[in-house]
């Protein structure tokens, strides 16, 4: 039985909601000011466990802490989805053409779509595909170590402290450069090594094979197409960059379509056939037949609620935001593809390029309609919020899978935090806009809003339609034959320095495994298995600590930035 008793509690909801308000506000500011948004999940896990233990005098369970941090972190990615898209409207001079009410509709529409889509996505990505989900894994290991203490706790919190101190020196004091080899100038290529323990840890956790494909995509896009093509006189550097961005988006969208076609759609059809239209968040055996008419009726009610929610979102998009029937239908349908892409990306890399998925759907809508530019930003915002929330939900579901937490309890907690986060994020964005004016947002302004600037640039259309079409077909076919097309697409699209840094993390894993294997060779055969398990656990825990340390300090720096920035 998937029971929420003892996991979804009143005290947990209260702690989670207070934390959600603070983290969401900080996330809006961070996303707009720095053009980046660190995952707050590990930070939220530590805070949740600390306060629950204090209130309950040590009797709180890991499952209750897991659900509490699910509530607490949910609003951050909703904030990211809005901050990475909507300010583009202000940059183009349409600040007076949008209202707080419309921003709230965008946020809530994205929240509902993200929550509904994850119901069908959970089983495939969490249980069947068994993706790594490095951020969710780090959260689970943090809770386990925090509860148990001992040697594991020292390893995790020691590495977390080192990464946190390193991040503070880099981001707050400016004593460490953010980029190594950043002075190497290669036209059209953002070359360098990002000085990030988190990204190195992601490469270590994801593994050599997947990151190698990721890095191969980066080499193909940057040195094959941009550098090689421009050197051969096939196109100039700017045109090469347009080809790369279009190709990368196409490959990612093709891979997302492949996920839906190969994995999600057959399961959805089978589930609908077996349960006559039910949707369930059962934790143990989703394929087991429903026992008794009452359970089947409950499942049908769940399906009806989900269908009504999606229909309500479609109506809100159509009439509330003025998109019209066809664009609204496209947004709702492609949200399934986009959230699947997000779940796959986060599961394999720990990265959620939510604004890219919003852009893909925006371009699809623009291709078949003549919507005004403001409405196109609404499309991107809805999908970006849905994808950001889907990435957060899947991380939390993975942590819950490790800890044995009820998916139903987590999903309810996610819904509470996401809706609360939507209101908070919109309020903070409105305050910032009113305080600083629309001219404060842009690449050369106080709030750089880098992702929203990209969306504003892309509103005019796909830079290279042929490259996008080739990527779309290639990504779809590659996924069908079992190739990690999403990793390839991310490598093509993302800045080269990110891919290079993650690749170095994967190479560190190769070196670590080789050294450990050499040490085990000196042991007696009966000792090797236990030592291998211990060494693997050490690598997992230490890398999770590095990831979590930067994440936590990133959130704390954001808190300080909010306090000092709003007071300026």
Image (tube, grey):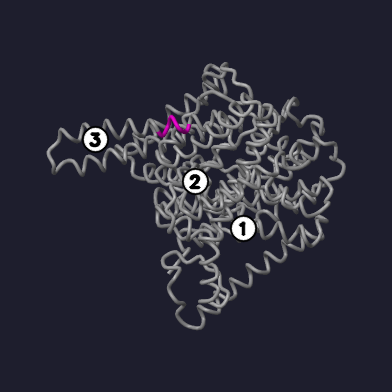
Above/below status of 46 relative to 14: above
The disc, 1 or 3, on the residue closer to the chain's N-terminal end is 1
Q: Which residue is mark 1?
A: 336
Looking at the image, which residue is at 80% across and 56% down? Answer: 323
For label 1, the crowd category at 10 Å Cα-Cα, with few meaning under 14, some 14 to 19 and many 20 or more, is many
Q: Is residue 169 above or below residue 26?
A: above
Residue contact at pointers 1 and 3, CB within 8 angstroms: no
Can residue 494 be seen? yes
Q: Position of residue 244 (x, y in %)?
A: 63, 36
Find residue 451 and report its image quarter: top right
Q: Residue furthest right?
A: 96
Residue 412 in view in this figure: no
Image quadrant occupied by the C terminus: top right
The verdict on residue 192 being magenta is no
Depicted 436 relative to depicted 81: above or below:
above
Label placed on residue 517? 3
Q: Position of residue 406 (x, y in %)?
A: 46, 60
The range drawn in magenta is 502-506
Q: Position of residue 16 (x, y in %)?
A: 56, 49
**SS of the residue at dot 1?**
helix
SS at mark 3?
helix
Alpha carbons under labels 3 and 2: distance apart: 38 Å
Q: Is residue 476 left or right of residue 156?
A: right
Residue under numbered circle 2: 48
């Amino acid at each position: 039985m998937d029971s929420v008793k003892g996991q979804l509690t009143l005290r947990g909801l209260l702690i989670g909601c207070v934390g959600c308000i603070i983290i969401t506000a900080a996330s809006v500011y961070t996303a707009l000011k720095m053009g980046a948004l660190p995952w707050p999940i590990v930070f939220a896990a530590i805070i949740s466990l600390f306060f629950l233990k204090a209130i309950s005098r040590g009797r709180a369970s890991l499952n209750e802490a897991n659900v509490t941090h699910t509530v607490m972190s949910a609003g951050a990615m909703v904030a990211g989805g809005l901050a990475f898209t909507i300010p583009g409207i202000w940059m183009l001079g349409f600040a007076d053409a949008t209202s707080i009410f419309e921003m709230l509709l965008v946020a809530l529409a994205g929240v509902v779509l993200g929550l509904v889509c994850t119901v069908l996505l959970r089983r495939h990505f969490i249980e069947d595909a068994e993706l790594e989900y490095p951020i969710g894994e780090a959260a689970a290991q943090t809770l386990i170590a925090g509860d148990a203490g001992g040697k594991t706790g020292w390893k995790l919190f020691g590495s977390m402290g080192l990464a946190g101190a390193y991040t503070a020196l880099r981001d707050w004091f400016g004593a460490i450069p953010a980029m190594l080899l950043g002075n190497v100038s290669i036209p059209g290529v953002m070359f360098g090594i990002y000085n990030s323990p988190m990204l190195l840890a992601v490469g270590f956790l994801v593994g050599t094979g997947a990151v190698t494909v990721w890095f191969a995509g980066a080499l193909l896009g940057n040195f094959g197409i941009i550098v090689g093509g421009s050197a051969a006189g096939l196109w100039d550097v700017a045109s090469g960059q347009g080809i790369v961005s279009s190709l990368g988006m196409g490959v990612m969208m093709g891979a997302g379509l492949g996920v839906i076609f190969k994995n999600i759609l057959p399961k959805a059809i089978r589930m609908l056939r077996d349960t006559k239209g039910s949707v369930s968040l059962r934790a143990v055996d989703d394929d087991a037949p429903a026992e008794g008419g009452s359970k089947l009726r409950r499942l049908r009610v769940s399906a009806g609620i989900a269908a009504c929610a999606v229909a309500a979102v479609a109506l809100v998009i159509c009439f509330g935001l003025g998109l019209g029937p066809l664009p609204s239908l496209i947004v709702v349908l492609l949200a399934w593809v986009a959230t699947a892409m997000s779940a796959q990306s986060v599961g394999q890399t720990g990265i959620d390029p939510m604004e890219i998925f919003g852009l893909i759907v925006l371009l699809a809508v623009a291709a078949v309609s003549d919507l005004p530019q403001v409405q196109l930003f609404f499309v991107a915002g809805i999908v970006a919020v849905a994808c950001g929330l889907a990435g957060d939900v899947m991380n939390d579901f993975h942590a819950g899978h490790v800890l044995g937490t009820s998916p139903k309890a987590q999903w309810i907690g996610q819904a509470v935090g996401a809706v609360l986060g939507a209101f908070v994020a919109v309020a903070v964005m409105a305050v910032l806009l009113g305080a600083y004016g629309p001219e404060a947002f842009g690449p050369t302004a106080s709030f750089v809003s880098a992702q929203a600037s990209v969306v504003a640039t892309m509103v005019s259309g796909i830079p290279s339609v042929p490259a996008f079409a080739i990527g779309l077909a290639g990504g779809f076919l590659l996924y069908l034959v079992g190739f990690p097309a999403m990793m390839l697409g991310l490598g093509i699209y993302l800045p080269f320095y990110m891919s290079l840094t993650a690749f170095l993390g994967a190479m560190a894993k190769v070196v670590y495994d080789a050294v450990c294997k050499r040490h085990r060779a000196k042991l007696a055969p009966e000792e090797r298995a236990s030592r291998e398990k211990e060494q693997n656990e050490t690598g997992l825990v230490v890398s999770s600590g590095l990831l979590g340390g930067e994440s936590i300090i990133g959130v704390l720096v954001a808190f300080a930035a909010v306090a000092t920035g709003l007071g300026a």
